[in-house]
Amino acid sequence: MALAGYVGQLTSHPPPHKLFNSNFSLIPKPKRSDLPLQALTVFTDGSGNSHKSVILWWDDQRGQWNSDIETVPDSPQIVELTAVVRVFRKWSMPLNIITDSAYVAGIVERAEASVLRDVSHSDLFALLQELIFLLDSRPHPYFIMHVRAHTSLPGFIAEGNRQADLLTLQVQVLPDRIAQAKLSHSFFHQNAGGLKRQFGLTSQQAANIIAVCPDCQKHSFPSIAGGVNPRGLQSLQLWQTDVTHYSEFGKLKYVHSSIDTFSGALFASCHTGEKSRDVHKHLMRAFATLGVPSQIKTDNGPAYTSATTKTFLDSWGVTHITGIPHSPTGQSLIERSHQSLKRLLQQQKGGVGTATPEECLQKALYVFNFLNCSLLDNNPPIVRHFNMNDSLEARIKAPVLV
């Protein structure tokens, strides 16, 4: 070992014994290089889930990635070691090998000119034996490097490692429409009309999905109905506004809501009270989401009949009307939406994890406005709201005066 790097001439004067007169040679220079080579760079990777052993390299002539993939039904370490052995089997020229397996990189760094002990795993023993033979018989050097997997760093090495990772993924088969509808309903709990529209199901198929949902069996969500209250002839003409209590929200149990009587689009927000300032905060958010209506109808509560609320609505140019005192039927549309919103909140409680009251309310509003629709009208409320108003239509051409 002391003479391994000596470049001069050696003269040996052994004793006359025959053991010292036999020819001997020093260990040859290792094939493994400590620095990257100006040579072909090959990326290797493997997966224990898909059992894919991947070799990837860049082809300069064709300007694209080339790959060699084999299926190895074994552990992830065996799968990745198989890829490296295939690299040495495939190329004898100088190589740069990039792997994201520290196990494989450590074995290759120590395998050259080593003595293999007995290994109980027959497949691993065969791979190690072939690896040592290929390394010892290589005529050209090689360089191997370990990199971290699943990084977002820029550069050729990270890009090649990402491409190799993608090739090891399993092929995801998209479920059929019924399975997709079941997965969507387990998260959103939309009604039968929404499932029918979104996934192209029949009314019976949508009803069957809801019938087997444990959350919807207890809290059934009705289809969107029109009601008999006076309604606007287009969106943003007449709203109904009211407040309800949802005790599970704690301090934010006061849920203020507004519904467009024509489209059925609903906006709700949770607050710590039901005073005038809470009404103003709710209406400001509702205006920013759905638009400013021409008229709002409320009950005769003190928060709605106060002078500050009148001043607030006048500043926005909104006409305020009230219904008959102590007659909840005058606000039937908003009362019905309160029931539907509470049912939807109860259905979605079966989801995984915990959410804040604001997050729960926004998720329920998304389902109410964008997913749910009646079996008679195939459009959800938000589509009717923004498509059935002249002022909200898109201008394809600018107006021209001739």
Image: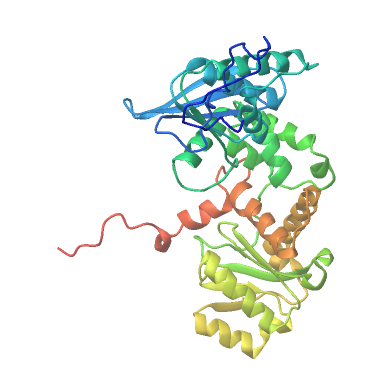
Q: Is residue 103 above or below residue 396?
A: above
The residue lying at 56 percent from left, 56 percent from top is 263
Q: Horizontally, is 33 left or right of 402 in the view?
A: right
Can I make out residue 118 in this image? yes
In what quadrant of the picture does the N terminus appear?
Answer: top right
Of residue 133 and residue 189, the one placed in the foreground of this image is: 133
Count up the numbered dots. 0
Q: Is residue 184 above or below residue 232?
A: above
Residue 57 occupies which quadrant of the picture?
top left
* x then y, percent, for residue 3: 57, 31
Residue 303 occupies which quadrant of the picture?
bottom right
The residue lying at 48 percent from left, 57 percent from top is 386
Of residue 388 and residue 145, the one placed in the foreground of this image is: 145
Of residue 40 and residue 271, the one placed in the foreground of this image is: 40
Residue 338 occupies which quadrant of the picture?
bottom right
Q: Horizontally, is 345 left or right of 63 in the view?
A: right
The residue lying at 75 percent from left, 58 percent from top is 355
In what quadrant of the picture does the C terminus appear?
Answer: bottom left
Q: What is the residue that sits farthest to the bottom in this orientation?
A: 307
The residue lying at 43 percent from left, 34 percent from top is 37
* x then y, percent, for residue 32: 53, 29
Identify the image's colour scheme: rainbow, by chain, secondary structure or one colour. rainbow
Of residue 311 and residue 230, the one placed in the foreground of this image is: 311
* x then y, percent, for residue 334: 69, 63
Q: Horizontally, is 93 left or right of 341 in the view?
A: left
* x then y, percent, for residue 377: 57, 44
